[in-house]
């Protein structure tokens, strides 16, 4: 394969990946918000664990889009799009890990505050009961 053939193949892949990810994020070919594409969806979801003796999480990449007035949705995930999504995720894993830690911290803090509020309410109620003759 000549270098021009390799370039043309890489260009085709780039255009396909860009097209897929723009559609999945409700953008038009110029990268601007596409209000007609109201079903753009790009998600990663947890699908379970691979084996009971090793704790790898199985994740699924999903990319799709659909248009106002239509119940149809169209898949925007293919092998090349998945390949580049995985590269991007791997290139940003430390930042993603730090954000995951921060999200868990915020959830912990919300749970701590709720527990504290509940404890204070119980103490107020028990104090009120004790002060009654």
Image: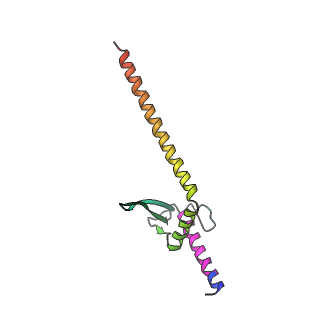
Q: In this view, does 6 lie to the left or right of 102?
A: right
Q: Is residue 7 visible?
A: yes
Q: Quadrant of residue 91?
A: bottom right
> Percent from the top left, x then y, of residue 28?
59, 66
Residue 70: x and y, percent?
46, 65
- Residue 36 appearing in the image: no
Residue 2, compared with residue 24, is above or below; it is: below
Q: Could you tell me which residue is drawn at 56 percent across and 67 percent down?
A: 87
Q: Residue furthest right?
A: 4
Q: In this view, does 83 lie to the left or right of 122?
A: right
- Residue sitting at x 56%, y 60%: 35
Q: Quadrant of residue 4?
A: bottom right
- The range drawn in magenta is 7-29
Which residue is farthest bottom? 1
Magenta region includes residue 57: no
Which of the pair 101/111 is nearer the observer? 101
Observer-nearest residue: 100 or 8? 100
Q: Position of residue 64 (x, y in %)?
A: 49, 66
Can you say whether 22 is above or below 13 in the image? above
* Image height of 130 relative to 120, above or below: above
What main secondary structure does the magenta stretch of the protein show? helix
Quarter holding the N terminus is bottom right
Residue 24 location (% of width, % of height): 53, 64
């Amino acid at each position: 394969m000549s270098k021009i053939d390799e370039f043309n193949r890489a260009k085709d892949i780039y255009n396909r990946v860009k097209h897929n990810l723009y559609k999945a994020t409700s953008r038009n070919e110029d990268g601007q918000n596409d209000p007609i594409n109201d079903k753009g969806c790009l998600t990663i979801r947890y699908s379970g664990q691979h084996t009971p003796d090793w704790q790898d999480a199985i994740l699924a990449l999903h990319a799709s889009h659909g248009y106002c007035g239509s119940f149809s949705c169209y898949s925007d995930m293919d092998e090349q799009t998945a390949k580049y999504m995985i590269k991007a995720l791997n290139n940003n894993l430390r930042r993603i890990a730090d954000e995951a830690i921060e999200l868990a911290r915020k959830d912990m803090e919300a749970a701590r505050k709720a527990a504290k509020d509940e404890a204070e309410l119980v103490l107020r109620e028990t104090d009120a009961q004790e002060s009654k003759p």
